Image (tube, rainbow, N blue to C red):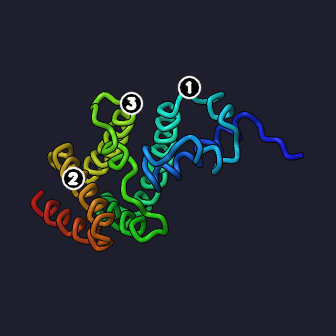
Amino acid sequence: MNETTGNETRDIILDVAEKLIYRNGIAATGMDLLVKTAGVSRKSIYRYFANKEDLVVAALKRRDERWMHWFSSEVDKAPTPAARLLNLFAVLKGWFASEGFRGCAFINTSGETGDPQDPVRQVAKMHKQKLLDYITRLCVDHGVEQPQVLARQVLILIDGAITLALVMGDHDAADQAQDVLKTLLAGQ
């Protein structure tokens, strides 16, 4: 008999929750679907998470860590600070074309919550702040005069490109956002 440890069970639950929430949204991801898809009992879920909200928050935090690691690792493969800034959008374009792309999980789940203090919204805010901090570091490395200003502009370009890629099916939105960044960098 193949028994899983507590951590493995928790990881399975989080993996399944993250995938279902990303694909279907929070509201459409009920506990029955989680139980069926994860192949665990409802009791197992509640052993690790007090309620659905705790599970959603944990799954989103996990996605943040994994996505930020993936994204920064890919962007940082470019050889120079200027190339890394432009590579933000090359990496995004690849993501847009990947199977199962459903936009930004943090924008999507934020849209399902009305309260800015909701824990889900707070995780989304934390994710966007981490992304902004990363972009700011790239701007500093490039020697931008006002790195915080440019970083906020780049974040808007990123989120705009993600939205167009999802809503319009326009994977070239990443190229267009990169062109806008080139213009901004030329004005530095």
Query: Which residue is found at the position 26% from the left and 54% from the top?
Result: 142
Q: Which residue is nearer to you in this view: 61 or 179?
A: 61
Q: Position of residue 119 (x, y in %)?
A: 39, 30
Q: Which residue is nearer to you in this view: 6 or 27?
A: 27
The residue under label 1 is which amino acid type? Ala
52 relative position to 143: left or right: right
Q: Is residue 104 above or below residue 101?
A: above
According to the image, label 3 marks what residue? Answer: 119
According to the image, label 1 marks what residue? Answer: 50
Q: CA distance from mark 1 to mark 3?
A: 14 Å
Which element is circle 2 on?
A: helix
Q: Position of residue 17 (x, y in %)?
A: 55, 45
Which element is circle 3 on?
A: helix
Q: Mark 1 or mark 3: which comes first in sequence?
A: 1
Q: Which residue is nearer to you in this view: 53 or 64?
A: 53
According to the image, label 2 marks what residue? Answer: 156
Query: Which residue is found at the position 43% from the left and 44% from the top?
Result: 27
Labelled pair 1, 2 in contact (Cβ < 8 Å): no
Q: Position of residue 75 (x, y in %)?
A: 40, 59
Q: Is residue 89 above or below residue 64?
A: below
Q: Residue 162 falls in which quadrant of the image?
A: bottom left
